[in-house]
Amino acid sequence: MTVLPRSEQRQAQRRALRDLDPEGYSRKNADALMRSRFKRSLDDYERVLAEQGGHCASCSWTEGQNGRRLSWDHDHGCCPGRNSCGDCVRGLLCNNCNYLAATFENEELRHRTEGVINYLTNWREQ
């Protein structure tokens, strides 16, 4: 009898649970991730998504358009990095808008972005 290392045993258990109830497994994992990173539940996500009309708060991108959920946006001035205290969560953005929002919050990156916009504008005018 072959004994699997503990990490492989856990992986096999997770695969078995996922195979039994793929939708429930995915929801449970999404809920746990949102609670740990943003202090928000999957129910909070679904409520905010409905309040936003089912799309990114900044553009018309809808959930699942690229096979992914929208991202929780938070104030990086309050909580730098990927995690949030929960008090500074603003809404749901697509990955592109979330990246841009974080970029514009950072003054140094905002100046670089303005430089890139000027560069592209000037190139088109040539």
Image: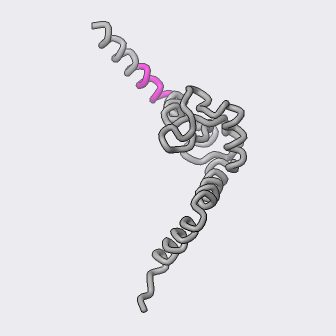
Q: Is residue 116 left or right of residue 35?
A: left
- Image vertical order of residue 107 relative to residue 32, above or below: above
Residue 115 % position (x, y): 39, 20
- Residue 2 seen in this snapshot: yes
What residue is drawn where x is 41% and y is 25%?
Answer: 112
- Image vertical order of residue 23 relative to residue 50, above or below: below
What residue is drawn where x is 54% and y is 31%?
Answer: 61
Magenta stretch: give its range: 107-114
Quick one: which residue is furthest to the front in this view? 20
Residue 62 % position (x, y): 56, 34
- Residue 77 seen in this snapshot: no
Q: Is residue 74 magenta?
A: no
Judge by depth and name the residue closer to the eye, 117 or 2: 2
Judge by depth and name the residue closer to the eye, 107 or 20: 20
Asked which quadrant contains residue 29, the reply is bottom right
- Image vertical order of residue 102 relative to residue 21, above or below: above
Residue 42 % position (x, y): 67, 49
What residue is drawn where x is 66% and y is 35%?
Answer: 90
Residue 30 % position (x, y): 61, 53
Majority secondary structure of magenta residues: helix
Quick one: which residue is furthest to the top in this view? 125
Q: Is residue 27 left or right of residue 1?
A: right
The way the protein has been coloured in the rendering is one colour
What residue is drawn where x is 54% and y is 69%?
Answer: 14
